[in-house]
Image: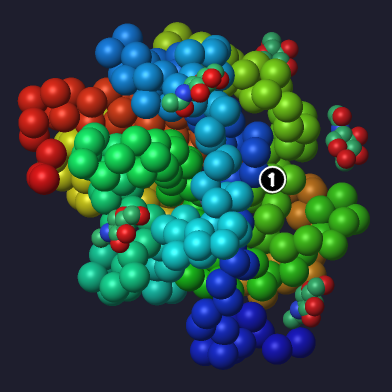
Amino acid sequence: MASVKSLLPFLIVLPGYVNAWGSLGHTTVAYLAQNLVCDKTAKFAQQLLNDSSPAYLANVATWADSYRNEPGGGFSSVYHYIDALDNPPESCNIDYERDCPEEGCIVSAIANYSSRAFEKNIGIIEQQKALKWVIHFVGDIHQPLHVENIAVGGNLINVTFYGAKTNLHSIWDTAIPQKAVGNFSQTNALSWANNLTAEIKHGQYMKESRTWLKRIDAKEAVESSLVWARDANKYVCSTVLPNGPDAVFDQELSGAYYEAAIPVVKKQIAKAGYRLAAWLDAIVEAAEKHEHPY
Ligand SMILES: *[C@@H]1O[C@H](CO)[C@@H](O)[C@H](O)[C@H]1NC(C)=O
Ligand SMILES: *[C@@H]1O[C@H](CO)[C@@H](O)[C@H](O)[C@H]1NC(C)=O
Ligand SMILES: *[C@@H]1O[C@H](CO)[C@@H](O)[C@H](O)[C@H]1NC(C)=O
Ligand SMILES: *[C@@H]1O[C@H](CO)[C@@H](O)[C@H](O)[C@H]1NC(C)=O
Ligand SMILES: *[C@@H]1O[C@H](CO)[C@@H](O)[C@H](O)[C@H]1NC(C)=O
Ligand SMILES: [Zn+2]
C-alpha cells in the first residue's frame, strides 16, 4: 500500500471534498451559544435573521454547507477550513501567512463576516449571510480536521467505522458525535447543548472554560480565531493521528480510537458554543461602539 503521505503532492485541490461537523455538531454549537449569549446579542440576531423562534441560531447553523453547493456559492467552500501545512504527528501548528492563501480560509472568513454582519450598506441579505457564516465557521474551526491539510483534511484516509466504509474526516464530522450522543434531530442537538451548558456552568468544564476565552478581542478577529484554530490543530497530533496516517488507513476505528476521540469531540463542541456566544457578544458590543474597521 502506498503511504498516504506519498500521495499528497498530487492532491492539491479537490474542491467540495471537505465537509463539516455534521448537522448534529453545528446545531448543538448554535443551541449552546443561544443558551449563553446576552439579551442584546439575542435581539440583534433575531432581528437580523427575522426569526424569534426558540431555534433562531440553530435554524441557520448548517446553511453554509448547502450554500457552498448552490450556483454562485462555490467561492465560499475554501472558507470552511484552513490547510495547515504542518507535519503531524511530529509537529502541529498553524502559520497564517503560510496556510491561508489569497482566496481566503476559515480564519480570514470569520474576520470578514464578523464585520460584514454589521455593515448596513451591503444590504440585509448580505448581512444575514455574514452572520450565518460566522455561526457556522466558529463551529468548523473547532473540528481538528478542518484546521489540517494532510490528506485533504483526512478525506483521503479511508477507514471503517462499525463496518461501514468511510473516511477519517467524515467520522470526526458526523459518525463519532452521533455514536456518542445519538443521531441528528433538533431535539437531540438541544438536549446535547443543554447538557454541555450544565457542564460548563457547574460540571466538568467549569474550571477550564475560564481559559477558553483567552485573547478574544473583537478588534483582532484574525488573531482571535487563530487562537481557536491552533487549539483545535493540536488535537491532530495528539488524538486524530497520534501514530500518523498509515496507522489508521483502512482500519476499523470503533474501538480504542473512538474511545480516545469522544472526550475531544465533546470538549471541542463545548468550546465552540461557548466561544461563539462570547464572540457574538463581543462583535455586537464593538459594533455598538463603532469599533469595527469599516
Ligand atoms: C420575516 O418572517 C415572516 C414570518 O416568517 C415573513 O412573513 C416575513 O416576510 C419575513 N420578513 C423578512 C424581511 O424577511
Ligand atoms: C468578504 O466577503 C465578501 C462577500 O462574501 C467577499 O466578496 C469578499 O471577497 C470577502 N473578503 C475577504 C477578504 O475575504
Ligand atoms: C479509498 O476509498 C475510495 C472510495 O471507496 C476509493 O475510491 C479509493 O480508491 C480508496 N483509496 C485508497 C488509497 O485505497
Ligand atoms: C441512527 O441512524 C442509523 C443510520 O440511519 C441507524 O442505523 C441507527 O439505528 C440510528 N440510531 C438511533 C439510536 O436511532
Ligand atoms: C443529556 O443528559 C441526559 C441526563 O443525563 C441524558 O438522558 C441525555 O441522553 C443527554 N443528552 C444527550 C444528547 O447526550
Ligand atoms: Zn462547514
* Residue 234 to residue 276: above or below: below
Q: To which residue does mark 1 refer? A: 174
The quadrant holding residue 127 is top left
Residue 25 visible in image: yes
- Asked if residue 112 lies left or right of residue 140, the reply is left
Q: Residue at left 73%, top 37%?
A: 178
**Does mark 1's beta carbon lie closer than 8 Å to ligand 4?**
no
Q: Position of residue 83 (x, y in %)?
A: 43, 68
Quarter for ligand 5?
top right
Figure quadrant of the C terminus: top left
- Residue at point 90% right, 55% down? 163
Q: Indicate the colouring scheme.
A: rainbow
Mark 1 crowdedness (10 Å alpha carbons): few <14, some 14-19, many ≥20: some
Q: Which residue is drawn at 59% across and 45% down?
A: 21
Amino acid bearing label 1: Thr
| Residue at point 67%, 60% (across, down) | 168
Residue 282 in the image, given as x and y percentages of width and height: 22, 27
The quadrant of the picture occupied by the N terminus is bottom right
Is residue 99 in sight in this rendering? Answer: no
* Tag 1 secondary structure: helix
Q: How many marks?
A: 1
Would residue 136 appear left or right of 6 to someone viewing this image? left
* 210 w.r.t. 39: above or below: below
Task: Between residue 248 and residue 221, name the one nearer to us.
Answer: 221
Looking at the picture, how far across and down is residue 99, in whole percent? Answer: 33, 70
Q: In which quadrant of the rendered view does residue 68 lie? A: bottom right
Picture coordinates of residue 197, whole percent (x, y): 49, 16
